Each structure stands twice: as C-alpha cells, then as structure tokens.
Image (tube, grey):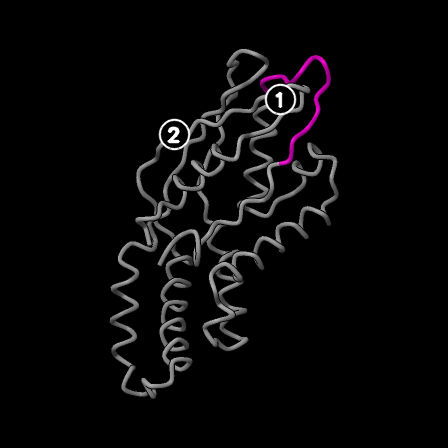
Amino acid sequence: MKKRGLLAVLLIAVMALLCGCGGMSAEDAQSYAKSIMDASYKGEFDKYVEWTKSSKEEAQKLYESNVDTTMQEAGFSQLGLSEELNANYRQLFLDMIKQANYEVGEAKEAGDKAYTVDVTVKPFTGFDGLQAEVEAATMAEVENIDVNDQNAVNELVFQKMYEIMAAKIASPTYGDPTTVTITVKPDSDGVYFIDQTDMTALDDALFPSDAF
C-alpha cells in the first residue's frame, strides 16, 4: 500500500494572497498558515476564506473534489468494488485526515518580508502493522469465496482493510512530537504563499509512509 495512492492526504490548494506594500505581520503569517492547515486537514474554512477572499462554497467544492481525485488515483474504479464499499472508503479518507495532530507556533521574521512558522506535529501511528492484520483477517475468510473471482477477492480484502482502518481511526494513536518549519513568503509581486514542498513535508510528518 502506498501513501500517495490509497492514503493520499487531501491537501487543499495553497492559495496565495496579496497583503499590500507593507507585507504581513507575524500574527498575519501565523493565522494564514493555520488557516491553510485547518482547511486542508480539518475541513474548517472560516479563516481560509477570509484570507483567500474565496467563498466557503468554493473551498468546500475544492475539498470534495480532492476526495474524488484521491479515489481515482487509488484505482478504486478498476477494483470492481461495490458502490457501498467505495462510499465507505471515501468517508474513511475524510475521517483519516481529520486526525491530523498539529499545533501552529508563532511566526518569526526570516528576512525579505518572509516568516518561518514552526509546526509541532504528532505523527499518526494508527496503521502500524496494518498489512499483517489485513492479511490475517482475509485468510480467515478466504475459503468462503471463489478465489478465481478477482472481484470477489478484492471485495473481501478491501472490506477487511476498511473495517480495521475504521476502528483504528476511531481510536487514533500518535508518535512522539516533531517540528516542521514552513515559510510564508512573498513572491516578486509581493503575493504571499507557502511553497508546496513545505506542505508536502508537513503532510509526510503527520502521516508518515511507514505507518501504513
């Protein structure tokens, strides 16, 4: 199982914003960074729409679109799974990313009107050992299906995986906290943004690939 397929985190687009000739304050940079994270992981858009001058409807539509993209990239349509199981996984993705555990620290000046923001992250460890658990659960029931029917095999495997994952998400566990530093900075036109590489690093820290 690969994180960038089945379990890709649904990062909302990092919208840039123009703050005028004076640039941002440290408090603005912290608030902007937190708004991006809250929108991306928690589906909380109030501050996000204030900063980006978008509507909550637009942000929600983008958030939902990212879910559909994740489902497509995971290849669910090629697995022959039931509509019910596909719908269950769609909701599972949303439930999973809302378990993101982070605390946004104060912004610090970094020169050239940029700010660094330290984010304290607790990595999600709920899926440690997931593959072995899924294999054991599948083997316990494989005799009840026609193993020559690939769709039936897929349905069994992914149903068991869904059940195990849903239970782990309901009672999340986390590793030791780490710090990820992101930068809120202006481009040559004075438009502030967070580089996508910073958001990817944050994502990897929150949901490490070796956790599943």
Q: Which residue appears at 43% of the width and 51% of the height? A: 4
The residue carrying mark 2 is 179
Left or right: residue 12 compared with residue 132: right
User: What type is the residue that disc 2 sits on?
Assistant: Thr
User: What type is the residue that disc 1 sits on?
Assistant: Asp
Residue interval drawn in magenta:
15-28
175 versus 192 height, above or below: below
Main structural element of the magenta stretch: helix, strand or loop? loop
84 versus 110 height, above or below: below
User: Secondary structure under badge 1?
Assistant: loop
Q: Position of residue 142 (x, y in %)?
A: 29, 82
Q: Position of residue 87 (x, y in %)?
A: 54, 69
User: The C terminus is located in which quarter?
Assistant: bottom left
The residue carrying mark 1 is 187
Question: Of residues 202 and 102, which is closer to you in this image?
Answer: 202
Left or right: residue 138 compared with residue 8: left
Classify mark 2: residues with Cα within 10 Å, few (<14), some (14-19) or many (20+). some
128 versus 151 height, above or below: above
Left or right: residue 67 compared with residue 168: right
The mark lying in front, picked from 2 and 1, is: 1
Q: Position of residue 188 (x, y in %)?
A: 64, 19
The image quadrant of residue 140 is: bottom left
Q: Which residue appears at 39% of the width and 75% of the height? A: 154
The image quadrant of residue 206 is: top left
